[in-house]
Image (spheres, rainbow, N blue to C red):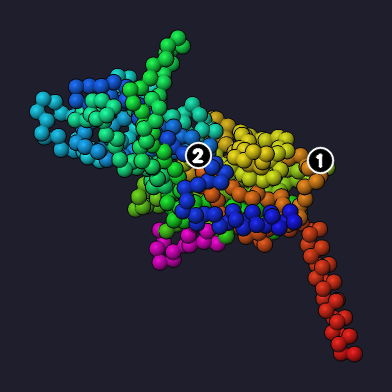
Amino acid sequence: MESIVVLLLLLFSCSTFTSTEAYDPLDPTGNITLKWDVMSWTADGYVAIVTMYNFQQYRHIQEPGWTLGWTWAKKEVIWNMMGSQTTEQGDCSKFKAGTPHCCKKDPTVVDMLPGTPYNQQIANCCKGGVLNSWAQDPSNAVSSFQLSVGSAGTTNKTVKLPRNFTLRAPGPGYTCGPAKIVRPTQFITSDKRRVTQALMTWNITCTYSQFLAQKTPTCCVSLSSFYNDTVVNCPTCTCGCQNKTQPDSCVNPDSPHLSSIVSSSGKPANTPLVQCTSHMCPIRVHWHVKLNYKEYWRIKITITNFNYRMNYSQWNLVVQHPNFDNLTQLFSFKYKSLNPYEGLNDTGMLWGVKFYNDFLSSAGSFGNVQSEILFRKDKSTFTFDKGWAFPRRIYFNGDNCVMPPPDAYPWSPNASSKLVFSLVITLVATLASLLIILN
């Protein structure tokens, strides 16, 4: 029965990518929440602080960073901003006394870069739009900016909430709900002796869908083991197929003048330029069952970057396997147990050690990181049969990686001999039946 459940889980992990729902079974409550706090009223509007909280356990926003947009409900303008800026000013020709920062009906806001002058900063700003995940680095999972809004309401009853919020990180994938008025945010003073609160607060919740972010997968998983010479590669054409009519669809690592080929590619900056492989994925995760001890067993994980145009800083890996409840030792990676469901401890989050291997370089000789994990055996569940030693699901940077089909997994010699024995018994029984019929 357990082996059937394992196979069903494996099949489910291969098919979950096609779901368009913004729901992650390994992070069911993960989202990015925008909190819009009105801090003071002005002659024609208000001053607000907008704070972005990344409550996703392992999905983060990397360079070139987030882009936030919305549509004003009336004819509001942004007089000035701190900690961020709009990408366009718009038509402000009707203003004579002073020129607003932005007059567009649908402004687009980006974070300021590190090194911004202090008089243009506020707390938690100016990170270039990079937002780390909550489990990996909660202190850097928050981003804020301040804006002064004009031509707006000046009371709680006359202020109109912005509409049609959009979040790009840096591409599509996030869907934002409508702004909802909530209890005003409270703030504790630095001496912790006084509590103040915002004049008005509304929240916007944005959730992620991998299918909306990209139509094809971005990573795949390959498998191997010490007890079987078979190396199960990523499924062919997992992330696309080599286009023989377009030679620049991928890069041959043995090409002369490789660096010039990569730099002269006509693809957009955010488009992967991958090494020519059978799977054509930017990222491959390899799981190798390495050693078997009396009380323990050991695996090796290798993450390889095949993308010549992307480095991954603050990368992370999420692995689902039932033996994570008995993890004994982890080498050269950091680890955090994820327990999305009470009583179930089968999911772990892994990431690199700062200044050692937290940076995954682009494709090439340095484009990989690896570690080994030692598990203690639970005699009631441990087995090498029927693919039990391999992961049920793997995510890289929050994206579900495509697993090989379960029937391709390396089987243990014992399992193979049992299968052969079963086939022999079946064949003998069939021949005996035929002999009886003929006689």
Q: What residue is drawn where x is 62% and y is 58%?
A: 11
Inspect this view and state whether residue 284 appears.
yes
In the rendered structure, which amino acid carries the disc numbered 2?
Gly
Marks 1 and 2 in Cβ contact (< 8 Å): no
Magenta stretch, residue numbers: 236-248
Query: Residue extending furthest bottom?
Result: 439
**In the image, is residue 78 above or below residue 260?**
above
Q: Nearer the viewer, mark 1 or mark 2?
A: 2
Q: Could you tell me how far apart the alpha carbons at marks 1 and 2 are, in whole angstroms?
A: 36 Å
- Residue 210, image x, y percentages: 47, 49
State the residue at coordinates (46%, 56%). 216
Secondary element at image label 2: loop
Residue at mark 1: 295
Instruction: Determine whether, in the image, residue 94 is placed left or right of residue 289.
Output: left
Q: Position of residue 135 (x, y in %)?
A: 54, 33
Label located before the other in sequence (1 or 2): 2
Count of residue discs: 2
Residue 371 picture quarter: top right
Instruction: Say what secondary structure mark 1 lies in.
Output: loop
Residue 4 appears left or right of 167: right
**Residue at the image position 42 percent from the left and 11 percent from the top:** 194
Q: Which residue is at 44% across, 64% downward?
A: 243
Q: Position of residue 221 (x, y in %)?
A: 59, 52
Q: Residues within 10 Å of mark 2 (few under 14, many from 20)?
A: many
The stretch drawn in magenta includes residue 428: no
Q: Nearer the viewer, residue 156 or 12?
A: 156
195 left or right of 47 in image: right
Which numbered tag is attached to residue 30? Answer: 2
Nearest the viewer among 102 and 152 is 152
Residue 428 sits in which quadrant?
A: bottom right
